[in-house]
Amino acid sequence: MALVPDNTLITDTPEQGRELAIMLARKTVGAMQPDTSVRQLLRPGYATNPDSLTAAAHVVAVEFATVAAANNYWRN
């Protein structure tokens, strides 16, 4: 499983960086729990839990900060 697509965090735009951050967060969950049926079983519990959704948003924010830093905040 490629956790960093094309082995780079460089993106052309902040929008692409945000999309990459979301994808990285999803791949992280998939790497930690590779069994699709287990993830589907757990989804109803966290999909309706505000604390779980906030935690998921935090993971995406951390990934986005990492991507932004790799892109020098899209300033050259």
Image (tube, rainbow, N blue to C red):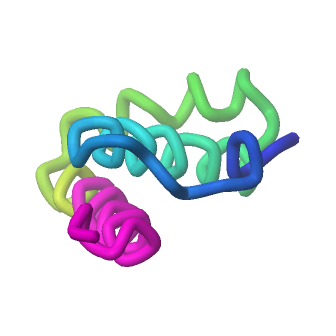
Determine whether 2 is above or below 76 in the image. above
Point out the residue furthest to the front here.
76
Residue 49 part of the magenta-drawn span: no
Horizontally, residue 54 falls left or right of residue 23, namely left
Quarter of image, res 51: bottom left
Estimate the x, y position of residue 38 in percent, counting from the top left.
Answer: 69, 32
Estimate the x, y position of residue 9 in percent, counting from the top left.
Answer: 55, 57
Q: Count the labels in the image.
A: 0
Instruction: For the C terminus, give its image quadrant.
Output: bottom left
Instruction: For the N terminus, give its image quadrant.
Output: top right
Residue 60 part of the magenta-drawn span: yes
Q: Please report the residue visible at 41 percent of the width from the left and 64 percent of the height from the top.
A: 67
Estimate the x, y position of residue 24 in percent, counting from the top left.
Answer: 54, 49
Point out the residue furthest to the left here.
50
Determine whether 35 is above or below 50 in the image. above
Magenta span: 55-76
Q: Report the magenta stretch's main SS.
A: helix
Determine whether 25 is above or below 62 in the image. above
Q: Please report the residue visible at 37 percent of the width from the left and 28 percent of the height from the top.
A: 44
Horizontally, residue 24 falls left or right of residue 37, namely left
Horizontally, residue 75 falls left or right of residue 5, namely left
Quarter of image, res 39: top right
Horizontally, residue 14 falls left or right of residue 26, namely left
Point out the residue furthest to the right here.
1
Between 69 and 55, the residue placed more toward the observer is 69
Q: Please report the residue visible at 57 percent of the width from the left and 27 percent of the height from the top.
A: 41
Between 56 and 6, the residue placed more toward the observer is 6
Between 26 and 67, the residue placed more toward the observer is 67
